[in-house]
Amino acid sequence: MSDKPVNMLLVNRRILRVSAENAEFQIIQALKTNRAKRHKTHEVFIEGTDCIRQALGAGLEFTRIIMGVREERLSDWARTLIQVQGAAVLIEMSPPLYASLCDRANPSELLVTAKIKPETENPVLLPPAPCILVFDRPSDFGNLGSIIRSANAFGIDALFTVGHGGDVYEPKVIRASLGSVFYTQIRHIESMKSLERFIYEQKQCCGLSVLGTDSVGSVSLRDKDLHAPIMLIIGNEAKGMSVALRGLCDEIVRIPITGAVNSLNVACAVSILLWELYRKR
């Protein structure tokens, strides 16, 4: 540890300098790459200025602020972040180590790790007539992040994932969501029984309708009036909805398209469906 200012940073901060792959570096790397580590410690790794801004705006507690050794002065944004997050450990590492943590072609000045609340401490809050999105076994990080972004943009009240699939706090998902993951109620449903029970309760209390989506669905979106309370279920990118999820649907809708292709990318399809629901609300 050292009290020497870094990059002309005029703040009284102690700095942990990392020049080799020591224990601290391995913890940071594990938060980036290891889902089990993230869920055990309730910490996430965040890369990208926009995502860091969103995490800050959402009130996440930053645990580490990481920078590479550099000659040029840090930006005002980076300096302010370091000042505001006074409790976070400030880490400076060699350029090769810093680069090994960055996926972006043009890395941001800073990387951060931050605390997230365990799901048990953060119950899902729904309005009387909710709009809920269910994603079956998400497998593509980019699609999952884009769907979270669309869900946030179009006012979806909660997003559920089911089955074995991608982690919503995978750094690539966070980046694809542009940080909207920190503003969206997202839960992983551990079992089909739990989802069945939730649907039954919502049908009883608010008349929830459950719509599946498929390129060969029996009902055209052109003829369907989407409105709350509603649950939209979207299938896995390659395999579609599971048989169990199909059995929970009241109807299965399709988006009418023309052209040589017979289906849309799942993130594109979700955006169309959510826009239809949003404009009716």
Image: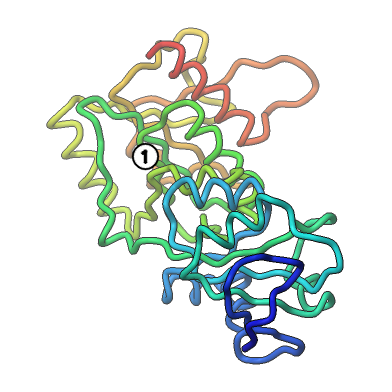
Give the answer, above or below, for where 212 lies relative to 31.
above
State left or right for residue 98 relative to residue 28: right
State left or right for residue 189 relative to residue 278: left
Crowding near pointer 1: few (<14 within 10 Å), some, many (20+)?
Answer: many
Position of the N terminus, as image quadrant, is bottom right
Q: Residue at x 65, y 70 (%)?
A: 66
- Residue 245 appears in the rendering: yes
Residue 226, position as x, y percentages in the image: 40, 16
- Residue 237 appears in the rendering: no
Position of the C terminus, as image quadrant, is top left
In this view of the protein, which residue sits in the foreground, 169 or 267? 169
Residue 227, position as x, y percentages in the image: 35, 17
State left or right for residue 248 relative to residue 135: left
Of all residues shown, which one is farthest toward the left? Answer: 205
Image quadrant where residue 156 sits? top left
Disc 1 element: strand
Residue 198, position as x, y percentages in the image: 23, 44
Residue 186, position as x, y percentages in the image: 40, 48
In this view of the protein, which residue sits in the foreground, 108 or 262? 108
Image quadrant where residue 3 sits? bottom right
State left or right for residue 21 relative to residue 114: right
Q: Residue at x 49, y 67 (%)?
A: 86
Q: Residue at x 25, y 46 (%)?
A: 196
Q: How is this picture coloured?
A: rainbow
Instruction: Give the residue at mark 1.
Output: 158
In this view of the protein, which residue sits in the foreground, 119 or 194? 119
